[in-house]
Amino acid sequence: MTRKIGIIGLGHVGATLAHSMILKHTCDHLVLIDTNEKKVKADALDFCDTVANTGYPVHITVNDYAALKDADVVVSTLGNIELQANNTDDRFAELPFTSKQVVQVARDLKASGFSGVLLVVTNPVDAVTQLYQQYTGLPKEQVIGTGTLLDTARMKRAVADRLQVSPASVSGYNLGEHGNSQFVAWSQVRVKGHAITDLFSQEELDAINYESLRGGHTVFFGKFYTNFGIAAAAQRLAEAVINDSHEEMPVSNYRPEYGTYLGYPAIVGRKGILERLDLHLTEEEKENYSIQLKPLRKTHEKDWSMHKSKESGTEIGHSLEFDFVVPPPHS
């Protein structure tokens, strides 16, 4: 069976992801789409030269939405990285740009007849994932965001560094929005089977939480973009779908009880979200999770109502308001 994957947006993340998929032979057919025709064609040629050195045949198609009709997975990595250059590390700064792009991409995806699994990397990922689901009309189980997968990896790396162990020895999750209000659910974190709360003081846990929260900020202001960590997260998520691995992952998935997409563990496989998990969180963790819901729902409702008003020809005034703040480092 031919494995086909599409990537929409060949910036730093999209190009890194495409390169990773070629090296790991994640697919047999790769469809690359970007508004910069010259850039995406140059990338495609570069990737063809890569294929010549791997020994794995990968067919590459450029800027053809029709080729996505029978794709197993499409990954949205579009964005405007310049909008991220703010001191608050506010991923919502991209929403006015990305929400407009989502509308057109969703229309093109629907027109292609795509019925596979749509993976969203585009920021702000939780809000954009919900918009993609609404605009494409795909089943909620088939639209998934990378969520807190990268934040969780940053937490595991920070814990592992302090204990001088492999990050693979650390289990647990960061939960919530991929942004300033996500948090580590310490009740779920284990290192080689030992509760993290038995290994670190509260002050140390606070420092790790802050490090995982601000990791993207540190990387971004070192090179003014991020790509490797998030591309690896997207690669892992795509593999879970392609290989039907039934893997447990903290991704942006629709939670019916909350009526929104947010980062929370789910089982991922060939058909997308196979099962939504329920963790036994502490009361404080439940509160931290629930306080993120109102501003996210408000954002979704505003953007969706604006879209519907445009469709009806009665556009209304629209502004974006967010209640998320960056917590200070533990003192």
Image (cartoon, helix red, strand yellow):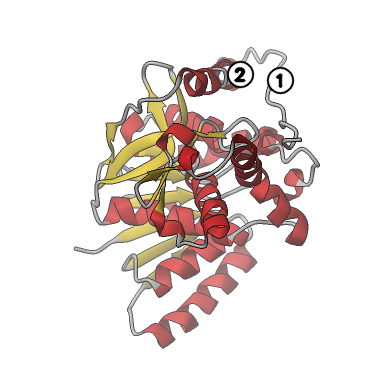
Q: Quadrant of residue 14?
A: bottom right
Tell me the number on the disc at residue 295: 2
Camera-side residue of 251 and 158: 158
* Residue at position x 39%, y 83% in the image: 54
Mark closest to the chain's N terminus, 1 or 2: 2
Amino acid bearing label 2? Pro
At mark 1, the secondary structure is loop
Q: Position of residue 325 (x, y in %)?
A: 72, 27
Q: Give neighbour class at mark 1: few <14, some 14-19, many 20+ (Cα, 10 Å).
A: few
Disc 1 designates what residue? 321
Q: Give the residue at the far right of this rendering.
A: 87
Q: Position of residue 141 (x, y in %)?
A: 32, 33
Of labels 1 and 2, the one closer to you: 2
Amino acid bearing label 1? Glu
Q: Is residue 277 left or right of residue 44?
A: left
* Residue at position x 35%, y 33% in the image: 138
* Cα gap from disc 1 to disc 2, whole angstroms: 8 Å
Q: Quadrant of residue 178?
A: top right
Q: Is residue 253 above or below residue 166?
A: above
Q: Position of residue 278 (x, y in %)?
A: 32, 26
Q: Give neighbour class at mark 2: few <14, some 14-19, many 20+ (Cα, 10 Å).
A: some
Q: Is residue 218 left or right of residue 102?
A: right
* Residue at position x 57%, y 17% in the image: 291
Q: Specify the quadrant that holds the C terminus.
A: top right
At mark 2, the secondary structure is helix
Q: Quadrant of residue 329?
A: top right
